[in-house]
Image (tube, coloured by chain):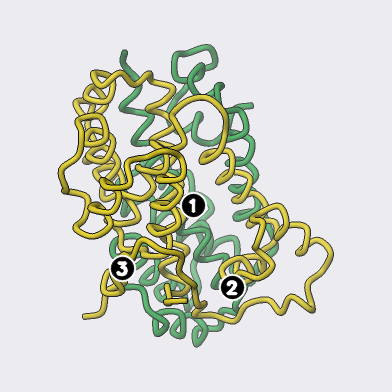
Chain colours: A green, B yellow
Amino acid sequence: MRDLIDELAGIAPGSRLDGLRALRPDVRGSLAGYEAAIFAGASGLSTGERHAVARHVAELNAEGALAAHHAARAGDSARLPTLLDYATLITRTPDRASPEAIETLMQAGLAPRDVVMLGQLIAHVNMQARLLAGLRLLEDV
Amino acid sequence: MKSTHDFGFPMQSLNWKAWAPVLDIAKATPDEIKVLEESHPKAKENPYYLLLVQEAEVLRQRSKLFNTIMYGPRGASRAERELAATAESRLNGCPYCASVHALRYVQMKGDPDLMARLMKDGVEVEMPPRARAIVDFSVKLAATPSAATKADVQRLRDEGMADAEILDIILSVAMFANANRLMQTLGEAVMP
Protein backbone atom coordinates (compact mmCIF):
# COMPACT_ATOMS: atom_id res chain seq x y z
CA MET A 1 0.00 0.00 0.00
CA ARG A 2 1.42 3.39 -1.00
CA ASP A 3 1.42 6.14 1.61
CA LEU A 4 1.87 9.92 1.66
CA ILE A 5 5.64 9.51 2.01
CA ASP A 6 5.81 7.55 -1.27
CA GLU A 7 3.75 10.20 -2.99
CA LEU A 8 5.81 13.15 -1.68
CA ALA A 9 9.18 11.44 -2.22
CA GLY A 10 8.17 10.36 -5.73
CA ILE A 11 8.76 6.68 -4.97
CA ALA A 12 7.49 4.78 -8.01
CA PRO A 13 6.00 1.28 -7.64
CA GLY A 14 8.69 -1.29 -8.40
CA SER A 15 11.57 1.18 -7.83
CA ARG A 16 14.54 0.44 -5.57
CA LEU A 17 13.18 2.57 -2.72
CA ASP A 18 9.76 0.97 -3.11
CA GLY A 19 11.46 -2.39 -2.65
CA LEU A 20 13.30 -1.22 0.47
CA ARG A 21 10.15 0.23 2.00
CA ALA A 22 8.24 -2.96 1.16
CA LEU A 23 10.49 -4.78 3.67
CA ARG A 24 8.58 -2.91 6.40
CA PRO A 25 4.92 -3.06 5.26
CA ASP A 26 3.69 -2.37 8.81
CA VAL A 27 5.49 0.98 8.78
CA ARG A 28 3.54 2.07 5.71
CA GLY A 29 0.26 0.85 7.22
CA SER A 30 0.67 2.45 10.62
CA LEU A 31 2.10 5.71 9.22
CA ALA A 32 -1.02 6.06 7.08
CA GLY A 33 -3.17 5.23 10.12
CA TYR A 34 -1.35 7.80 12.26
CA GLU A 35 -1.71 10.46 9.55
CA ALA A 36 -5.45 9.79 9.25
CA ALA A 37 -6.03 9.78 13.01
CA ILE A 38 -4.30 13.17 13.35
CA PHE A 39 -5.89 14.98 10.42
CA ALA A 40 -9.27 13.29 10.01
CA GLY A 41 -10.18 12.58 13.65
CA ALA A 42 -12.62 14.75 15.60
CA SER A 43 -10.73 17.36 17.62
CA GLY A 44 -11.07 20.70 19.37
CA LEU A 45 -8.43 21.85 16.89
CA SER A 46 -10.13 22.63 13.59
CA THR A 47 -9.01 20.84 10.43
CA GLY A 48 -7.76 24.17 9.09
CA GLU A 49 -5.68 24.77 12.24
CA ARG A 50 -4.17 21.29 12.07
CA HIS A 51 -3.11 21.68 8.44
CA ALA A 52 -1.78 25.20 9.10
CA VAL A 53 0.41 23.92 11.94
CA ALA A 54 1.58 20.99 9.79
CA ARG A 55 2.50 23.33 6.94
CA HIS A 56 4.47 25.48 9.38
CA VAL A 57 6.42 22.52 10.83
CA ALA A 58 7.17 21.25 7.30
CA GLU A 59 8.47 24.72 6.37
CA LEU A 60 10.66 24.87 9.48
CA ASN A 61 12.18 21.59 8.30
CA ALA A 62 12.58 22.87 4.71
CA GLU A 63 10.29 20.14 3.34
CA GLY A 64 8.58 22.02 0.52
CA ALA A 65 6.47 19.20 -0.88
CA LEU A 66 5.12 18.34 2.56
CA ALA A 67 4.34 22.02 3.24
CA ALA A 68 2.54 22.32 -0.10
CA HIS A 69 0.49 19.21 0.68
CA HIS A 70 -0.90 20.92 3.79
CA ALA A 71 -1.12 24.46 2.37
CA ALA A 72 -4.26 23.73 0.34
CA ARG A 73 -6.18 22.71 3.47
CA ALA A 74 -4.69 25.23 5.92
CA GLY A 75 -7.10 27.61 7.66
CA ASP A 76 -6.83 30.53 10.03
CA SER A 77 -8.09 31.36 13.51
CA ALA A 78 -7.55 33.99 16.19
CA ARG A 79 -5.39 31.60 18.20
CA LEU A 80 -3.41 30.23 15.24
CA PRO A 81 -0.36 32.47 15.97
CA THR A 82 -0.19 30.92 19.47
CA LEU A 83 -0.27 27.42 17.95
CA LEU A 84 2.44 28.31 15.41
CA ASP A 85 4.69 29.83 18.10
CA TYR A 86 4.34 26.64 20.10
CA ALA A 87 5.13 24.54 17.00
CA THR A 88 8.30 26.58 16.38
CA LEU A 89 9.43 26.10 19.99
CA ILE A 90 8.86 22.33 19.95
CA THR A 91 10.35 21.83 16.48
CA ARG A 92 13.46 23.99 16.83
CA THR A 93 14.26 23.91 20.54
CA PRO A 94 12.44 21.01 22.21
CA ASP A 95 14.75 21.40 25.22
CA ARG A 96 13.18 24.81 25.92
CA ALA A 97 9.74 23.26 26.51
CA SER A 98 8.10 24.22 29.80
CA PRO A 99 4.86 23.91 31.78
CA GLU A 100 4.33 27.61 31.04
CA ALA A 101 4.21 26.89 27.30
CA ILE A 102 1.43 24.33 27.92
CA GLU A 103 -0.36 26.84 30.16
CA THR A 104 -0.32 29.38 27.30
CA LEU A 105 -2.07 26.81 25.07
CA MET A 106 -4.72 26.11 27.70
CA GLN A 107 -5.35 29.84 28.09
CA ALA A 108 -5.90 30.02 24.33
CA GLY A 109 -8.77 27.56 24.87
CA LEU A 110 -7.14 24.17 24.26
CA ALA A 111 -8.47 21.28 26.35
CA PRO A 112 -5.94 18.68 27.58
CA ARG A 113 -6.78 16.40 24.67
CA ASP A 114 -6.24 19.28 22.24
CA VAL A 115 -2.78 19.80 23.75
CA VAL A 116 -2.12 16.10 23.13
CA MET A 117 -3.35 16.36 19.54
CA LEU A 118 -1.17 19.41 18.89
CA GLY A 119 1.87 17.65 20.37
CA GLN A 120 1.24 14.51 18.30
CA LEU A 121 0.79 16.59 15.15
CA ILE A 122 4.05 18.52 15.63
CA ALA A 123 5.90 15.30 16.52
CA HIS A 124 4.43 13.52 13.49
CA VAL A 125 5.50 16.15 10.95
CA ASN A 126 8.99 16.29 12.47
CA MET A 127 9.16 12.52 12.02
CA GLN A 128 8.02 12.71 8.39
CA ALA A 129 10.69 15.33 7.65
CA ARG A 130 13.46 12.94 8.84
CA LEU A 131 12.01 10.06 6.87
CA LEU A 132 11.74 12.11 3.66
CA ALA A 133 15.30 13.46 4.04
CA GLY A 134 16.65 9.99 4.82
CA LEU A 135 14.93 8.35 1.86
CA ARG A 136 16.43 10.94 -0.51
CA LEU A 137 19.89 9.87 0.68
CA LEU A 138 19.13 6.24 -0.20
CA GLU A 139 17.99 6.98 -3.76
CA ASP A 140 21.32 6.10 -5.41
CA VAL A 141 23.22 2.85 -4.98
CA MET B 1 17.36 29.99 30.54
CA LYS B 2 16.08 26.59 31.59
CA SER B 3 16.71 23.56 29.39
CA THR B 4 15.54 19.97 29.64
CA HIS B 5 19.28 19.08 29.45
CA ASP B 6 19.66 20.50 32.98
CA PHE B 7 18.26 17.32 34.56
CA GLY B 8 21.32 15.37 33.38
CA PHE B 9 21.33 11.88 31.84
CA PRO B 10 21.51 9.25 34.57
CA MET B 11 21.60 5.71 33.23
CA GLN B 12 18.81 4.36 35.42
CA SER B 13 15.01 4.04 35.34
CA LEU B 14 13.32 7.40 35.81
CA ASN B 15 9.78 8.53 36.45
CA TRP B 16 7.86 11.06 34.40
CA LYS B 17 5.46 13.83 35.41
CA ALA B 18 2.88 15.30 33.02
CA TRP B 19 2.47 19.07 32.58
CA ALA B 20 -1.19 18.70 31.49
CA PRO B 21 -4.04 16.74 33.13
CA VAL B 22 -4.00 12.97 32.42
CA LEU B 23 -6.86 10.46 32.11
CA ASP B 24 -8.25 9.10 35.38
CA ILE B 25 -7.88 5.36 34.76
CA ALA B 26 -11.05 4.71 36.80
CA LYS B 27 -12.99 6.62 34.12
CA ALA B 28 -11.32 4.97 31.11
CA THR B 29 -13.58 3.55 28.39
CA PRO B 30 -13.05 -0.06 27.22
CA ASP B 31 -11.43 1.29 24.04
CA GLU B 32 -9.02 3.48 26.02
CA ILE B 33 -8.05 0.47 28.15
CA LYS B 34 -7.48 -1.55 24.99
CA VAL B 35 -5.24 1.13 23.45
CA LEU B 36 -3.21 1.36 26.68
CA GLU B 37 -2.75 -2.41 26.70
CA GLU B 38 -1.63 -2.36 23.05
CA SER B 39 0.82 0.47 23.70
CA HIS B 40 3.03 -0.71 26.56
CA PRO B 41 2.86 -3.46 29.23
CA LYS B 42 2.76 -0.87 32.03
CA ALA B 43 0.87 1.90 30.23
CA LYS B 44 -2.08 1.83 32.66
CA GLU B 45 0.21 3.05 35.47
CA ASN B 46 2.29 5.42 33.36
CA PRO B 47 1.29 9.13 33.26
CA TYR B 48 2.84 9.53 29.79
CA TYR B 49 0.43 7.01 28.27
CA LEU B 50 -2.45 8.24 30.44
CA LEU B 51 -1.88 11.67 28.95
CA LEU B 52 -1.61 10.50 25.34
CA VAL B 53 -4.59 8.12 25.51
CA GLN B 54 -6.90 11.15 25.65
CA GLU B 55 -6.46 10.98 21.85
CA ALA B 56 -6.95 7.23 21.82
CA GLU B 57 -6.94 6.48 18.09
CA VAL B 58 -3.86 8.66 17.53
CA LEU B 59 -2.03 6.77 20.30
CA ARG B 60 -3.15 3.40 18.90
CA GLN B 61 -1.68 4.16 15.47
CA ARG B 62 1.48 5.70 16.90
CA SER B 63 2.11 2.71 19.18
CA LYS B 64 1.80 0.33 16.24
CA LEU B 65 4.30 2.44 14.31
CA PHE B 66 6.70 2.70 17.25
CA ASN B 67 6.63 -1.02 17.96
CA THR B 68 7.21 -2.05 14.37
CA ILE B 69 10.09 0.42 13.91
CA MET B 70 11.92 -0.46 17.13
CA TYR B 71 11.10 -4.16 17.51
CA GLY B 72 10.29 -5.43 14.00
CA PRO B 73 12.24 -8.54 12.86
CA ARG B 74 15.29 -8.57 10.53
CA GLY B 75 17.09 -5.46 9.32
CA ALA B 76 19.27 -3.36 11.62
CA SER B 77 20.04 -5.01 14.96
CA ARG B 78 17.92 -4.02 17.94
CA ALA B 79 21.06 -2.62 19.60
CA GLU B 80 21.91 -0.37 16.64
CA ARG B 81 18.34 0.97 16.46
CA GLU B 82 18.58 1.73 20.20
CA LEU B 83 21.97 3.41 19.70
CA ALA B 84 20.49 5.79 17.11
CA ALA B 85 17.46 6.50 19.34
CA THR B 86 19.59 7.15 22.42
CA ALA B 87 22.09 9.40 20.63
CA GLU B 88 19.23 11.53 19.30
CA SER B 89 17.53 11.67 22.72
CA ARG B 90 20.83 12.72 24.32
CA LEU B 91 21.29 15.42 21.67
CA ASN B 92 17.74 16.75 21.93
CA GLY B 93 17.82 16.63 25.72
CA CYS B 94 15.19 14.04 26.64
CA PRO B 95 16.57 12.38 29.81
CA TYR B 96 13.64 9.97 30.17
CA CYS B 97 13.86 8.73 26.55
CA ALA B 98 17.66 8.49 26.74
CA SER B 99 17.61 6.46 29.96
CA VAL B 100 15.02 3.93 28.72
CA HIS B 101 16.82 3.36 25.43
CA ALA B 102 20.37 3.41 26.86
CA LEU B 103 19.33 0.58 29.17
CA ARG B 104 17.65 -1.28 26.33
CA TYR B 105 20.77 -0.90 24.15
CA VAL B 106 22.80 -2.62 26.87
CA GLN B 107 20.15 -5.36 27.27
CA MET B 108 20.42 -5.99 23.52
CA LYS B 109 24.16 -6.69 23.94
CA GLY B 110 25.35 -3.16 23.16
CA ASP B 111 28.61 -1.94 24.71
CA PRO B 112 27.80 -0.79 28.29
CA ASP B 113 30.98 1.31 28.59
CA LEU B 114 30.31 3.18 25.35
CA MET B 115 26.75 3.92 26.44
CA ALA B 116 27.75 5.05 29.92
CA ARG B 117 30.17 7.55 28.38
CA LEU B 118 27.66 8.74 25.77
CA MET B 119 25.09 9.39 28.48
CA LYS B 120 27.56 11.20 30.70
CA ASP B 121 29.52 13.27 28.16
CA GLY B 122 27.39 13.36 25.01
CA VAL B 123 27.37 12.12 21.44
CA GLU B 124 30.97 13.12 20.64
CA VAL B 125 32.63 10.56 22.93
CA GLU B 126 35.05 8.13 21.31
CA MET B 127 33.57 4.92 19.91
CA PRO B 128 34.41 2.21 17.32
CA PRO B 129 34.02 3.25 13.63
CA ARG B 130 30.68 1.53 12.96
CA ALA B 131 29.02 3.00 16.07
CA ARG B 132 30.63 6.37 15.25
CA ALA B 133 29.16 6.29 11.73
CA ILE B 134 25.68 5.45 13.08
CA VAL B 135 25.80 8.18 15.72
CA ASP B 136 27.17 10.84 13.35
CA PHE B 137 24.46 10.11 10.79
CA SER B 138 21.72 9.97 13.43
CA VAL B 139 22.53 13.25 15.15
CA LYS B 140 22.77 15.12 11.83
CA LEU B 141 19.41 13.82 10.62
CA ALA B 142 17.95 14.51 14.06
CA ALA B 143 19.16 18.10 14.36
CA THR B 144 18.52 19.33 10.79
CA PRO B 145 17.25 16.73 8.31
CA SER B 146 19.00 18.36 5.33
CA ALA B 147 22.39 18.26 7.15
CA ALA B 148 22.75 14.50 6.68
CA THR B 149 24.49 13.70 3.39
CA LYS B 150 25.07 10.87 0.95
CA ALA B 151 28.65 10.75 2.26
CA ASP B 152 27.26 9.89 5.71
CA VAL B 153 25.21 7.07 4.15
CA GLN B 154 28.29 5.86 2.24
CA ARG B 155 30.20 5.61 5.54
CA LEU B 156 27.45 3.33 6.86
CA ARG B 157 27.70 1.18 3.72
CA ASP B 158 31.50 1.06 4.07
CA GLU B 159 30.99 -0.19 7.62
CA GLY B 160 29.08 -3.14 6.16
CA MET B 161 25.48 -1.96 6.55
CA ALA B 162 22.97 -2.95 3.90
CA ASP B 163 20.53 -0.28 2.69
CA ALA B 164 17.67 -2.13 4.42
CA GLU B 165 19.55 -1.68 7.70
CA ILE B 166 20.29 1.98 6.97
CA LEU B 167 16.57 2.51 6.32
CA ASP B 168 15.90 1.04 9.78
CA ILE B 169 18.32 3.56 11.30
CA ILE B 170 16.51 6.36 9.41
CA LEU B 171 13.17 5.07 10.74
CA SER B 172 14.55 4.93 14.25
CA VAL B 173 15.79 8.54 14.03
CA ALA B 174 12.46 9.64 12.52
CA MET B 175 10.56 7.89 15.33
CA PHE B 176 12.63 9.59 18.01
CA ALA B 177 12.26 13.02 16.41
CA ASN B 178 8.66 12.23 17.28
CA ALA B 179 9.14 10.53 20.66
CA ASN B 180 11.46 13.18 22.09
CA ARG B 181 9.07 15.94 21.05
CA LEU B 182 6.23 14.30 22.96
CA MET B 183 8.06 13.16 26.05
CA GLN B 184 10.25 16.18 26.73
CA THR B 185 7.60 18.78 25.91
CA LEU B 186 4.43 17.44 27.56
CA GLY B 187 6.10 16.70 30.90
CA GLU B 188 9.45 16.05 32.51
CA ALA B 189 11.71 13.37 33.93
CA VAL B 190 11.75 13.01 37.73
CA MET B 191 13.94 10.90 40.00
CA PRO B 192 12.12 7.81 41.33
| In the image: residue B133, left or right of residue A81 | left
In the picture, the disc for residue B53 is none
Is B55 situated left or right of A9 in this image?
right
Counting other residues with Cα less than 10 Å from the Cα at mark 2, is it few (<14), some (14-19), or many (20 or more)?
some
Residue drawn 28% across and 54% down? B116
Tag 1 and tag 3, C-beta contact below 8 Å: no
Kind of element beneath mark 1: helix
| Marks 2 and 1 share the same chain | no
Q: Give the letter of the chain under mark 1.
A: A
Give the chain of mark 3: A
The secondary structure type at the circle numbered 3 is helix
Q: Tell me the crowding category of disc 1: few under 14, some 14 to 19, or many 20 or more residues within 10 angstroms, Cα based.
A: many
Tag 2–tag 1 contact (CB < 8 Å): no
Give the percent coordinates (x, y) of residue B45: 65, 70
Q: Position of residue B94 (x, y in %)?
A: 36, 63
Q: Is residue B127 above or below residue A55?
A: above
Residue B39 picture location, percent across and down: 65, 54
As drawn, the label of residue A95 is 3
Q: Which residue type carries mark 1?
A: His
Observer-nearest of B75 and B104: B104
In the picture, residue A41 is in which quadrant?
Answer: bottom right
Judged by depth in the image, the label closer to the viewer, 2 or 1, is 2
Amino acid carrying mark 3 in the image: Asp
Residue under label 2, please give it: B47
Q: Which residue is mark 1?
A: A124
Which amino acid type is marked by label 2? Pro
